[in-house]
Image (cartoon, rainbow, N blue to C red):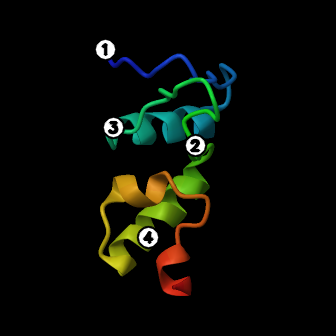
Amino acid sequence: MINAGFDLAVPRRRDKSAWEALEATLRAGLTFHSCGCGGPGYRPRSTAEVRERRRAAKQLGLLEQATLERYDPWEELAR
């Protein structure tokens, strides 16, 4: 059992990609807690987004959690 937080928007029952993305997000240690102001921030909504962020983490040498919570997983290269 994981306390995912009050800001969790549960995917539709048949949206397998969204459920897999949610599982990857929670396994990486990201939750949906916030102070109620702006929400928990970016969270991937599909397996394609998770794959892209995992690839970025590997190539950039970052933790998976760090890239899963970014809108742009490649932002390190832009700096």
Circle 3 residue:
27
Q: Amino acid at mark 2?
A: Gly
User: Is the Cβ of the residue at disc 1 closer than 8 Å to that at disc 3?
Assistant: no
Q: CA distance from mark 1 to mark 2?
A: 22 Å
- Residue lying at 33% horizontally and 37% vertically, measured from the top left: 27
- Residue lying at 37% horizontally and 17% vertically, measured from the top left: 3
Q: Which mark is residue 41?
A: 2
Tell me how many marks there are.
4
Dot 1 falls on a residue whose secondary structure is loop
Disc 1 or 2, which lies upstream in sequence? 1
Q: CA distance from mark 2 to mark 4?
A: 20 Å
Disc 1 or 4, which lies upstream in sequence? 1
Mark 2 or 3, which is nearer the eye?
Answer: 2
Circle 1 residue:
1
Q: Amino acid at mark 4?
A: Arg
Mark 2 or 4, which is nearer the eye?
Answer: 2
Disc 2 or 4, which lies upstream in sequence? 2
Q: Position of residue 13 (x, y in %)?
A: 65, 19
Q: Which mark is residue 55?
A: 4
Q: Position of residue 53 (x, y in %)?
A: 49, 62
Q: CA distance from mark 4 to mark 3?
A: 17 Å
Q: Which mark is residue 12?
A: none
Disc 4 or 3, which lies upstream in sequence? 3
Determine whether 35 is above or below 62 in the image: above
Q: Amino acid at mark 3?
A: Arg
